[in-house]
Amino acid sequence: MELWLVRHGETIVGEDGLYQPHHGLTELGFEQARSVAHALKDVEFDECYSSNLPRAIQTAQTYADLTSRRFNRIADLNEIDVGRIKDASVAFKNDVVNHRVELDFSQFGGENPDQFSNRVQQGFHQLLEDAKSKNCARIVGFLHAGTIGVILDHVAGRAFDYRSRPRMPNCAYTIVSETSNGGWTKWERWHSDHLTAIT
């Protein structure tokens, strides 16, 4: 089975520069979503999936509107739960925005990296079970950078480390495939050529 993983488009952030779970795409984010939808429109996917967060749903819906496809939502493939991060100090928020801090939001009632990784792995196995029950050969998921990182590390047989790859651009995608021995091919790169004309 071939697995295509797409990151959502640019997302509306608060004054503190952070996402909130209910935030959707910016105008640029919708433009990015249209660009990746056109890039993938001729690829024959057997099933399409997204997380249950608006930014991923809107990206998937843009593809679905172009291709007349339906997609399935899996809540366990949501991005890390940041809890009540609005209560965090300005310094902590700045560290999160600038990727200078571990992704541990347990002190705010959210998830730590282990909890996040375990949940996403459950969601990924749910996705695989659904796809395999339908004999899918190629599927696409419209997800999040963190979620995609967990999946890539999981299929590589290592613990989640969001710093192990270059940052994934919005609406870039990557492809991994199951091998004949039940493993997966290695991650190679983010595909983002379709975004070059977008500023």
Image: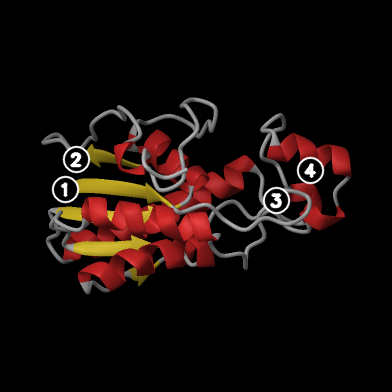
Element marked by disc 1: loop
Label whose residue precedes the other's in the sequence (4 or 3): 3
Left or right side of 46 for 111? right
- Residue found 13% across the figure and 57% down from its top: 44
The answer, for residue 53, to whether it is visible in the render is no
**What is the distance, in whole Å, between disc 2 and disc 1 at their CAs?**
5 Å
User: What residue does disc 2 label?
Assistant: 178
The residue mark sitting in front, 2 or 3, is: 3
Element marked by disc 3: loop
**Relative to the observer, which residue lies in front, 177 or 66?**
66
The kind of residue tagged 4 is: Lys
- Residue found 85% across the figure and 49% down from its top: 88
Label whose residue precedes the other's in the sequence (2 or 4): 4
Label whose residue precedes the other's in the sequence (2 or 1): 1
The residue mark sitting in front, 2 or 4, is: 4
Left or right side of 174 for 21? right
Q: Is residue 182 placed above or below 17 in the rendered structure?
A: above
The residue mark sitting in front, 4 or 1, is: 4
The kind of residue tagged 1 is: Met
The kind of residue tagged 2 is: Glu
**Callouts 2 and 1 close, C-beta under 8 Å:** yes
- Residue found 51% across the figure and 48% down from its top: 118
User: What residue does disc 4 label?
Assistant: 93
The kind of residue tagged 3 is: Leu
Element marked by disc 4: helix
User: What residue does disc 1 label?
Assistant: 1
Q: Residues within 10 Å of mark 4 (few under 14, many from 20)?
A: some
